[in-house]
């Protein structure tokens, strides 16, 4: 029988014999009822032990390729093929995933929402992983609670009170794999046919897509310098929830004042809908304290979403939600049948990192750094553009919005900037309607850039804008 | 003004002043246009610095609670309340999440699918977390590829070839947060109105719920000792996909022979649907090699789901899918708007654990242990029940199915067993139809139990059954 075996391949000899015979059957070279040599004969032929051949034959019998006929021997079973099967796929020549190009970039990218990851607390977390992996009970490596690790929920409850003044029970805290998952799951939980979702306009387009993917029709409400204009929502009916970023409107940066907050709550109570409060970067406010939450005004109507992406790293995919009592069960059931629960080990690590004060220390350090970067960016803008611009939004977050009085960010201009290896993000890209209203404005994210890059980037921008 | 501050609370004085005033406004004790004392006066009154009071006032102005009138001072802004807001929630008295009771259990639980976690490779992974957290570029802490970390996909591709004989490109490998998420996402990707899903009957009820939650009507096809009976599917139309466990039918344990596999493929081609192959524990086969995959017979029609829950731990929520080219884009888009990507750091750790041979060493060790436990369980069954039972399914996995000739597992009997602190799982609980057919059979999971528990558990079972 024509079987080639390779004693240096690292694959066991019986596996090789098994594969060769299987391939011959599936490619049609061996046919129904054809008799195979006895294991003794084939073993001799290939200079292997008889057990090696028997192992291969038994595997082929178990999978239905071979049959034994008593007193006759081993034969090929009936295997009806519609087409030949080609196993010779070579995966080694495949090119790399194009998504990974970003790692080789050499452009200055003013994208928003990326923290300074050169200061990611590697050492501290490394120690905590060691400690946690040592200390956990073996039961902690089983399936865990769908709502999240209890210890983490306790720590977040206390953390929220310390840093945000939010009073809530760990029982209402649900751990999610990043705020995107939180928004996705809650959109599904609240979904009813033909209901709408009210969102801010402009908005983070990815999160808009999360909501629309669930099947909602979306109503964008224009934002002014104080956030969502609550006068415009009063006449809207059949609303499932209102998605809002009241502490720091994304991307424009306004704070929603208490009067509008109370109007939102009133609307939610009267229309029996919910408010989803996305508190994506409230920790970074450089003047005064973090803004109070909408949640505390009515914990029965507000779903609060928090994230560790901006304060630690998006790679860890960790966030949480505060849920009203009446939707917790529906939520848990959906989370259970979506991914059972969020990965446990890093939940324990994060709980310890909050408990030992490491997280708040990290936030404090980053806040000082981001404030310096923000000031530096504005200084450079003042040098390069003097009176040609104004800054919008409050003194907070990982990005600023710049309004250039005499510049219109046309596609052509954005392309020229792109070709000069600079990335800026026109507010038009975030707008659902009235795009023209924002054509003087861009987002400049600065948190992840170093001072040199900020300076070079703004200088480059001035060159392109002024020669235009 | 009636403000009490506590110098030992750990909360900053300005925060305390801010909170007190805000609470007075929201509870109606301070009214519209009422004038506040000047910052200087209040500072004196409370014996704090003037800046402390100014910080509090500025925060309240930013949030819209206060307004300044030039030449007049600071007044309460108009805040219209529908109801008083009570902030005095006390979370410390809350009881613990009931889901956590399992940790205090002292019963012998023959549940299936839980690996021996006392041997979870803590030290090895601890070292790898340290190494990975040290070695990664800061760019790796950003958002990563939706499909998963490329390095892990490469390692899985080679691992699958070594351990399963599967040839596939890393480009077709998608990292998911456990196989449950894989099944949930793929069910959503393939969803069309009024389409059905064919499943095996009996089946894992949790996974059935994952499929039905998406909106499908589900058709259960009876399983015999060789897995799903493919003759029964031929007349079914409008099928989105067939969900199957061909290597080790769950829970009954049969291997789907090559003839039925080819019939499944033929059906999928002719009816333009997919086959979802859940390969949940194929690594643990104690006689012969792992069974070949359905996937290799037609990578354009089969979606392969693999999991690290059984070979490492369910807590890490890590799995993968092999996807046909034509649905990769739809899948990536859905995953993107579900949770962006699976947590990256443990993906890098797992990649390294596969690369350095640790995972296969671990599997080898566990396989030997599980085989011993399985034999021990059968030995004890033989001692306690001699000829009163038979074992169903192949010599594989983390559980066995036992058929007791003279025992019917009524609810009453199960309750008696339950009261004796033993948990066994009647096959009836897994059956969609024809429950009566399985009333002599139970699942006994053994992987996570120690030898003593196995012995005690079976002895207890005999006592209850024989006195019944």
Image (cartoon, coloured by chain):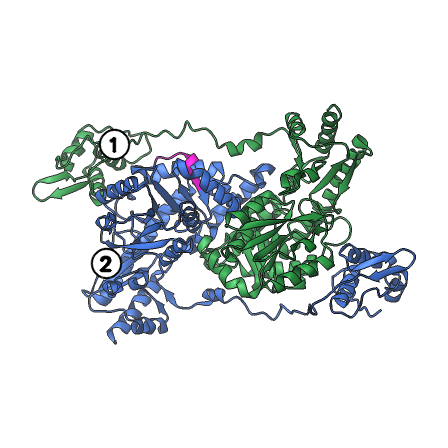
Chain colours: A blue, B green
Q: Is residue A267 visible?
A: yes
> Is B57 a magenta residue?
no
Spot occupied by residue A139 in the image (x, y as percentages of width and height): 59, 37
Q: Residue at x 68, y 37 (%)?
A: B436
Q: Residue at x 50, y 50 (%)?
A: B215
Specify whether disc 1 shares its chain with disc 2.
no
In this orientation, which residue lies closer to the viewer: B249 or A351? Answer: B249
Chain letter of the residue carrying label 1? B
Residue A225 lies, with reference to residue B65, above or below; the image says below
Residue found at the very far top of the displayed protein: B467
Spot occupied by residue A384 in the image (x, y as percentages of width and height): 24, 67
Label 1 Cα neighbours within 10 Å, binned few <14 / some 14-19 / many ≥20: few
Spot occupied by residue B275 in the image (x, y as percentages of width and height): 61, 58
* Magenta-tinted stretch: A167-174
Label 2 Cα neighbours within 10 Å, binned few <14 / some 14-19 / many ≥20: some
Q: Is residue B131 visible?
A: no
Q: Quadrant of residue A83?
A: bottom right
The residue under label 1 is B84
In this orientation, which residue lies closer to the viewer: A401 or A272? Answer: A272
The residue under label 2 is A391
> Is A171 a magenta residue?
yes
Q: Say what secondary structure mark 1 lies in.
A: loop
Q: CA distance from mark 1 to mark 2?
A: 37 Å
Residue found at the very far right of the displayed protein: A71
Chain letter of the residue carrying label 2? A
Q: Residue at x 39, y 39 (%)?
A: A323
Residue found at the very far left of the displayed protein: B71
Is residue A79 shown left or right of residue B328?
A: right
Q: Quadrant of residue B161?
A: bottom right
Q: Nearer the viewer, mark 1 or mark 2?
A: 1
Residue B48 lies, with reference to residue A112, above or below; the image says above
């Amino acid at each position: 029988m024509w079987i080639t075996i390779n004693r240096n391949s690292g694959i066991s000899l019986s596996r090789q014999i098994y594969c060769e015979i299987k391939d011959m059957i599936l490619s049609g070279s061996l046919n129904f009822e054809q008799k195979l040599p006895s294991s003794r004969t084939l073993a001799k032929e290939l200079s292997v032990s008889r057990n090696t051949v028997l192992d291969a034959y038994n595997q082929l019998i178990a999978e239905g390729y071979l049959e034994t006929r008593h007193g006759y021997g081993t034969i090929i079973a009936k295997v009806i093929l519609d087409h030949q099967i080609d196993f010779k796929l070579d995966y080694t020549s495949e090119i790399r995933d194009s998504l990974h190009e970003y790692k080789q970039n050499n452009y200055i990218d003013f994208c928003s929402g990326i923290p300074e990851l050169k200061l990611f607390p590697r050492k501290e977390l490394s120690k905590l992983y060691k400690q946690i992996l040592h200390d956990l009970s073996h039961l902690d490596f089983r399936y865990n609670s769908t709502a999240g690790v209890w210890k983490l929920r306790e720590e977040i409850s206390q953390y929220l009170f310390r840093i945000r003044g939010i009073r809530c029970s760990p029982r209402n805290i649900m751990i999610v794999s990043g705020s995107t998952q939180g928004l996705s799951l809650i959109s599904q939980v609240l979904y009813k046919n033909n209901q709408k979702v009210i969102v801010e306009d402009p908005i983070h387009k990815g999160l808009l897509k999360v909501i629309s993917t669930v099947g909602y029709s979306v109503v964008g409400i224009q934002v002014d310098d104080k956030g969502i204009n609550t006068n415009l929502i009063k006449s809207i009916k059949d609303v499932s929830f209102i998605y809002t970023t009241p502490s720091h409107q994304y991307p424009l940066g306004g704070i929603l004042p208490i009067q509008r907050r109370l109007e939102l709550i009133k609307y939610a109570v009267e229309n029996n809908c919910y408010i989803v409060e996305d508190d994506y970067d409230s920790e970074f406010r450089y003047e005064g304290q973090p803004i109070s939450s909408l949640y505390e005004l009515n914990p029965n109507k507000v779903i609060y979403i928090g994230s560790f992406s901006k304060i630690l790293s998006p790679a860890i995919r960790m966030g949480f939600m505060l849920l009203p009592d009446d939707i917790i069960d529906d939520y848990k059931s959906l989370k259970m049948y979506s991914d059972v629960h969020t990965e446990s080990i890093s939940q324990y690590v994060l709980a310890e990192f909050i408990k030992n004060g490491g997280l708040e220390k990290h936030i404090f350090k980053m806040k000082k750094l981001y404030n310096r970067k923000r000031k530096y960016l504005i200084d450079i803008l003042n040098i390069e553009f003097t009176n040609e611009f104004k800054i919008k939004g409050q003194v907070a977050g990982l990005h600023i919005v710049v309004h250039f009085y005499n510049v219109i960010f046309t596609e052509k201009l954005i392309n020229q900037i792109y070709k000069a290896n600079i990335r800026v993000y026109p507010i038009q890209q975030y707008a659902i309607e009235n795009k023209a209203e924002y054509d003087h404005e861009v987002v400049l994210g600065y948190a992840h850039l170093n001072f040199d890059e900020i300076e070079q980037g703004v200088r480059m921008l001035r060159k392109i804008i002024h020669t235009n």
